[in-house]
Amino acid sequence: MGSDLYEKVGVKYLENILRISMKTSLSRVKRSITIMGRKSGEALDFAQLLYVPMQVADIFTLGINIAHGGMDQRKAHVIAIDIGEKLFGYKPIAIHHHILTGIHISERERELVLKAKSSGDKEYVQEALMDIKMSKSKPKTAIFIHDDPEEVKSKVRKAFCPMGGIEVNPILELTKYVIFPLVGDMEIVNAKTGEKKIYATYEELERDFVTKVLHPADLKRTVGETLSEILHPAYKYFKEGAGRKYLEEMETLKVTR
């Protein structure tokens, strides 16, 4: 548990935060905080500023050589790379992955992201995407590895998936970044005709979706079933196996946003 670790290294962790803070300017910290912090302007809490050196201190307190996170963590990781060798004797490697769109976004939120993309401002686009990402603090936007199969299917069935729209489409993202890499292909049945089609690649599926050959309802049904199968071992571990105690402990914690 993280709490066990920091009880042992608490003083060292605080020392690392201070050392990092002394080598990082205030303006850089402000540029590195999350989208929520940047939007708050004058309402910015000091805790939000402190979070950046805490992120960096995590890496060196744990002795991490490869820091893995979403694109929203990249600026903090760049600070770690810049100051790491001088303060801690090594430069960590940072690996960032694509952040999935929350499954229950609105058409208005989608339009805001598309507007950001049309501006050509990469920073603006990234901030807009951070606003609609899957988040544990907004449970309805996310699929958890311990969700039961019916809950996974229900979430996907209710998810935002505009007909023919490939940009800012959470269901297409799940097929591209989760299902195809893990499963390899997808068999989708047309509910009206009973016709079956096997898609060997995401590109094939996207072409049919754009031309409206593939209906969102048929896609969502298959995505829900496939995701529930992928996540079933994790669900069993947390609901029936050794992980049950961890899930029960986690559920006692309250996360607010």
Image (tube, rainbow, N blue to C red):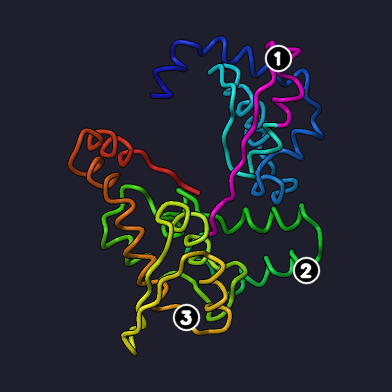
Mark 2: which amino acid?
Answer: Ser
The residue at which mark 2 appears reads as 118
Q: Earlier in the sequence, mark 1 or mark 2?
A: 1
The earlier-in-sequence mark between 3 and 2 is: 2
Q: Which secondary structure, mark 1? A: helix
* Snapshot quadrant of residue 23: top right
Q: In what quadrant of the picture does the N terminus appear?
A: top left
Residue 82 image offset from top left, x and y in percent:
76, 24
Task: Tell me how many marks there are.
Answer: 3
Magenta includes 11?
no
Mark 3 to mark 1 CA distance (whole Å): 55 Å
Q: Callout 1 environment at 10 Å: few (<14), some (14 to 19), or many (20+)?
A: some
Which residue type carries mark 3? Leu
Q: Choose mark 3 or mark 1, whichever is in front.
A: 3
**Image side of residue 21 versus residue 147, left or right:** right
Against 59, residue 86 (above or below) is above
From which residue to which does the magenta span run? 78-101
Q: CA distance from mark 1 to mark 2?
A: 41 Å
| Tag 3 residue | 214
